[in-house]
Amino acid sequence: MKTDLAGLMEAYQAHLEDQERGACSGCPAPEGLVRLLERQAGRKERKMILDHVAGCVDCALLLKSALRLSGEIDRVLGRDGALRIAPREGAAAGTGGPRFLLGRRAAFGALAGALGLAIVTYSVIRLAEKPVVRGAAGPQVRLISPVKGASVPAGEIEFLWETVPQAARYSLEIFNGSLERLWRSGPLTEVRLPLPEDARGAIRPGESYFWRVTAVLKDGQELASKLAEFSVGKMPA
Amino acid sequence: MTGKPESFDSFLDSLTPFLLSELRALGYVAPSPERDDLLQEIRIRIWQALRERKGEINFFNAYVKKVVLSVFINAGRKISRERKIFDPSGCDENRIGKKGQDRVESNDMLKDILADALQSLGREKRRVVELRFEGFSFAEIAQLNSWSLRKAQSAYYRGLADLRDSLAKRGIHYED
């Protein structure tokens, strides 16, 4: 039996889902997670929490979310500088209309976001219904670079793959670490593609991504490459 | 400490959309009143601390960050508890059902063998491989372990190599 990285990740997720259906107990206290995020947890505590998180879907989701929030707080604080304190009149008492106006704006934003997500999910499902041949005998799409976890600076990312003789066109997809698709190209005729401007917004320095190429042959058959992983190097300070 | 009155509130205003979006991603679907409670709790905790310390808090930015994270994690835990009460099977469609729709069904045998093979790895390698399989990026793994990015990548690839050997012994051939 053969498998690849995507198969292992799916199998592990399925394993965790099984575990979650059973009892998931011993989740670390919120204070422990805050200490971990703030790098204030001792070595023993850190290992204990991470051992738990590695096998607990709930804590992993919460921690990932809190990490993003922590980064956003740093970003906002970095932009605004040292905070000054003085309570807005009546703020602590829960009065004040503007709060609800902000809530409405956020709700509209969320609704638009959810609609966008639904459209993307629908497109992915539709796409998944197309017959894609992988690992079959005959022509294959081989990725040349970046592969095997290469670390590439964001400005120098260029995707390169081998020509498939009968290919009429290609398309390239970029996925995040959870294998959710972030970007898909239009039809390509070259076997080389520098990271386009519109995909750069989805790529963050220090993160890892997967990519693959699908070749559409002249008879309409599609051949997908394997997924290749690459990391985006941090920008020089 | 005191000065322009808008600073702390404008910080919260800037952060609120992101905070709520993250909570929503965790399954938070309650209407606005409770969301407002969350922001009020952050404010109240800060004001209480200021009152107790007579308006002087050292490293105020760091303190605010700690309070926001703490309130957020408490809310996340509450969402998780409520979900388990309403859906004891743990089959929340918002969270794990999606995988079933847009990913290929995992092979039960592979799942069991993988769980077994992971047990054979050293504790540190296993932890890094499992975190990576759960979708944490190398940067996040490095941050959580207080490691450099290079060390996180190295630990993962060494763990993956061991896992490949362990899987091979169990009849599963991993291909890059």
Image (cartoon, coloured by chain):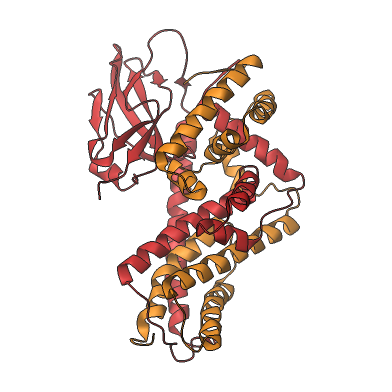
Which residue is drawn at the image coordinates 45% and 41% (left, top)? Answer: B138
Give above or below for A159 relative to B76: above
Residue B110 percent coordinates (x, y): 65, 24
Q: Quadrant of the N terminus of chain A?
A: top right
Which residue is drawn at the image coordinates 39% and 30% (left, top)? Answer: A149
Quarter where residue A73 is shown: bottom left
Rendered shade, chain A: red
Residue, far front: A43
Residue, far bottom: A89
Indicate the chain coloured orange by its letter: B
Which residue is drawn at the image coordinates 24% and 39% (left, top)? Answer: A196
Which residue is drawn at the image coordinates 54% and 38% (left, top)? Answer: B128
Of residue A210 and residue A149, the one placed in the foreground of this image is A149
Q: Is residue B162 left or right of residue A232?
A: right
Residue A232 seen in this snapshot:
yes
Of residue A98 and residue B159, the one placed in the foreground of this image is B159
Residue B91 percent coordinates (x, y): 69, 46
Of residue A214 and residue A18, the one placed in the foreground of this image is A18
Q: Is residue A146 left or right of residue B12?
A: left
Residue B137 percent coordinates (x, y): 46, 42
Give above or below for A179 relative to B79: above
Quarter where residue A146 is shown: top left
Residue, far top: A138
Residue A190 percent coordinates (x, y): 22, 24
